[in-house]
C-alpha cells in the first residue's frame, strides 16, 4: 500500500510540474528573457525582460500570464502598443521607459485590470487627457511627461490610492488643481518651461505627502 501511495504522490508531482512547465518556462522567449521568482509578498511572479533588445514592436509571442514586463530602452512607437492588450489581465508592473511614444490609446490602459506600477520615463506624450489614466488603480506612476496635461487627468477615483508620482510638465500654464484628489507620499515635479507655479498646486495631500521635489531652471 505504501508503494502505491508513493507512486500516486510521485504521479501528482510530475503532473503538476508538467502543467507548470507548459504554462511558464524560464529562459528565452522570443527576443526577451522570461523567468519567474518569488515576490516580496511570497507569491510567484512571472517576468519578461525585454529591455534594450532593439525591438520596434511589442512581442506577440510572450506567455500571457506575465506579471512584470520591462520594455524599456527600445524603439517602440505609438502603433506598436496595441499588443499590450494581450497581456493586460495579469500585468502588475509595466515599463515603457525611454522609447518613442507620443500617444497611448485609452483602450490599452483600460485593459490593465491589475496594473499597479507604470513607468513612462523618457517619452514625451502630446497630451494627457481626463480619461487616459481614469481606469487605472496605480501604486506608482513614474516619469509621465507631456506637452499638455489636462486639469482633470489625475482626478480618477483609482488614482486616489497612488503613493508615488513623478511628472514632467512641458507646458507653461500649469493647472492649479491637477493634483487635487491625490494622496501620494512622494511627489517629484519638473517644470521644463514654466516660470511660475500656481499658488494652489500643492494644497493637496496635507495628510499624506512626506517628500516633495521640485525642479525647474526657469522658475522665478
Image (cartoon, rainbow, N blue to C red):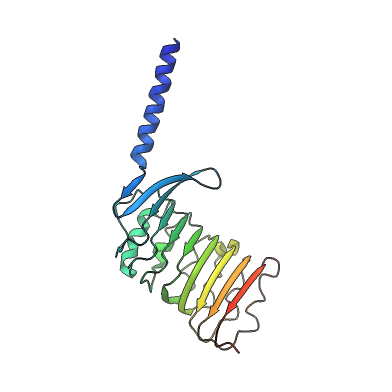
- Residue 59 sits above or below residue 123 on the image: above
Q: In the depicted view, which residue is nearer to us: 45 or 113?
A: 45
Q: Does 47 sit left or right of 139 as displayed?
A: left
Query: Residue 162: percent from the left, percent from the top?
Result: 58, 63
For image coordinates 38% across by 68% down, the residue present is: 105
Asked where in the image residue 212 lies, by quadrant, the reply is bottom right
- Residue 54 sits above or below residue 174 on the image: above
Image quadrant for the N terminus?
A: top left
Q: In the depicted view, which residue is nearer to us: 54 or 192?
A: 54
Is residue 182 in view? no
For image coordinates 38% across by 55% down, the residue present is: 49
For image coordinates 33% across by 54% down, the residue present is: 32
Q: For the view shown, which residue lies furthest in the right direction?
A: 207
Q: In the depicted view, which residue is nearer to us: 151 or 125?
A: 125
Is residue 106 in view? yes
Query: Residue 15: percent from the left, percent from the top?
Result: 37, 29
Query: Residue 7: percent from the left, percent from the top?
Result: 39, 18
Asked where in the image residue 204 lies, by quadrant, the reply is bottom right
Image quadrant for the C terminus?
A: bottom right
Q: Does 203 sit left or right of 111 as displayed?
A: right
Query: Residue 9: percent from the left, percent from the top?
Result: 43, 21
Amino acid at each position: 500500500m505504501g508503494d502505491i501511495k508513493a507512486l500516486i504522490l510521485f504521479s501528482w508531482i510530475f503532473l503538476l510540474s508538467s502543467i507548470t512547465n507548459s504554462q511558464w518556462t524560464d529562459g528565452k522567449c522570443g527576443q526577451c528573457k522570461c523567468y519567474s521568482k518569488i515576490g516580496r509578498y511570497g507569491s510567484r511572479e512571472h517576468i519578461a525582460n525585454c529591455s534594450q533588445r532593439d525591438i520596434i514592436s511589442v512581442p506577440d509571442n510572450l506567455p500571457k500570464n506575465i506579471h512584470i514586463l520591462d520594455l524599456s530602452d527600445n524603439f517602440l512607437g505609438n502603433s506598436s502598443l496595441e499588443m499590450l492588450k494581450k497581456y493586460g489581465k495579469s500585468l502588475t508592473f509595466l515599463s515603457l521607459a525611454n522609447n518613442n511614444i507620443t500617444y497611448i490609446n485609452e483602450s490599452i490602459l483600460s485593459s490593465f485590470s491589475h496594473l499597479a506600477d507604470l513607468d513612462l520615463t523618457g517619452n514625451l506624450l502630446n497630451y494627457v487627457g481626463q480619461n487616459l489614466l481614469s481606469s487605472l488603480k496605480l501604486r506608482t506612476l513614474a516619469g509621465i511627461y507631456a506637452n499638455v496635461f489636462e486639469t482633470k487627468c489625475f482626478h480618477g477615483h483609482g488614482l486616489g490610492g497612488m503613493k508615488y508620482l513623478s511628472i514632467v510638465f512641458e507646458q507653461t500654464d500649469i493647472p492649479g488643481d491637477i493634483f487635487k484628489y491625490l494622496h501620494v507620499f512622494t511627489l517629484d515635479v519638473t517644470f521644463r518651461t514654466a516660470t511660475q507655479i500656481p499658488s494652489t498646486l500643492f494644497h493637496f495631500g496635507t495628510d499624506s505627502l512626506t517628500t516633495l521635489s521640485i525642479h525647474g531652471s526657469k522658475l522665478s
